[in-house]
DNA sequence: TCGCCGATGTTCT
DNA sequence: GAACATCGGCGAT
């Protein structure tokens, strides 16, 4: 089974929980995602196509990397058919491979803090603007679908946004200790 | 453990 | 000139 990135962002965000992502062999299990799309005021692709969000309007199955608050990088997977401006923000991983490399880059030891946040995981995996627009099925990326059919996915409201806060478009691996923040259910 | 706050670049008004 | 899909440090509890 492969992940179908041409599906809507909500479906992809749910399907990615329990999958693994690696950049040059460094990465882990995805435990937290958020869906965004063109009709969503909180999305970078809301409204019209611009230089920054261009990749979101391109073919699915590519990375969209942007700078957040002038300091951090954030990694998204573009999804839905080309032109839809949809994507999934990868918010947290449970580290599994290249842990020493991650500790080196992050300058901390605590496994739980290595990748528990969108900025943190990009730092740990070495993701920068150089990765913007790259295909996810080629080096340096590798995305492995989940194998555990029994895992439980929970959903709640997204984090750090001011618009469309009520939408339950955040997905997490239920019970994971590697989330950026606890899940908050939709009102 | 929690919450406030500054850092800092890019985008949009 | 304001807002922002964040993080880490600091002081208060």
Image (tube, coloured by chain):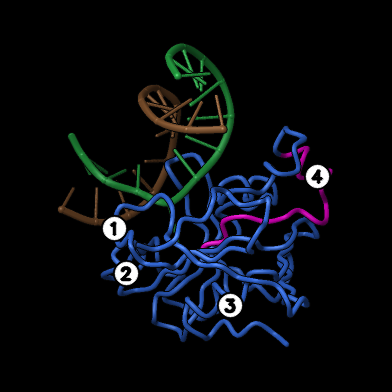
Chain colours: A blue, B brown, C green
- On screen, residue A132 versus residue A177, left or right, reads left
Circle 1 residues within 10 Å: few <14, some 14–19, many ≥20: few
Question: Which chain hosts label 1?
Answer: A
| Between marks 2 and 4 in the image, the one whose residue lies nearer the viewer | 2
Give the mark nearest the N terminus, 1 or 4. Answer: 4
Which structural element holds mark 2? loop
Residue pointed to by mark 1 = A163
Circle 1 or circle 4, nearest the eye: 1
- Determine which residue is flagged by label 4: A101
Say which chain tag 4 marks.
A
Q: Quadrant of the N terminus of chain A?
A: bottom right
- Cα separation between marks 4 and 3: 26 Å
Q: What element carries label 3?
A: loop
Q: Is there CB contact under 8 Å for labels 1 and 2? A: yes
What residue did someone put label 3 on? Answer: A61
| Residue for badge 2 | A40
Question: Disc 2 or 4, which lies upstream in sequence?
Answer: 2
Mark 2 → mark 4, Cα distance in angstroms? 36 Å
């Amino acid at each position: 089974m492969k992940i179908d990135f041409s599906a809507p962002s909500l479906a992809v965000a749910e399907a990615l929980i329990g999958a693994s992502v690696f950049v040059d062999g460094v990465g882990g299990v995805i435990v937290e995602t958020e869906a965004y799309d063109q009709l969503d005021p909180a999305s970078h692709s809301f409204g019209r196509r611009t230089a920054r969000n261009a990749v979101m309007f391109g073919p699915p199955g590519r990375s969209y990397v942007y700078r957040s608050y002038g300091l951090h990088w954030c990694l998204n997977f573009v999804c839905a058919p080309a032109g839809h401006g949809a994507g999934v923000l990868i918010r947290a991983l449970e580290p599994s491979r290249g842990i020493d490399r991650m500790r080196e880059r992050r300058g901390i030891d605590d496994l739980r803090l290595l990748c528990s946040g969108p900025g943190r995981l990009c730092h740990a995996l070495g993701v920068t603007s150089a990765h913007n627009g790259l295909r996810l099925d080629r080096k340096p990326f590798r995305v492995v679908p989940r194998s555990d059919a029994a895992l439980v996915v929970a959903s709640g409201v997204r984090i750090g946004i001011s618009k469309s806060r009520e939408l339950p478009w955040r997905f997490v691996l239920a019970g994971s200790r590697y989330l950026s923040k606890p899940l908050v259910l939709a009102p």
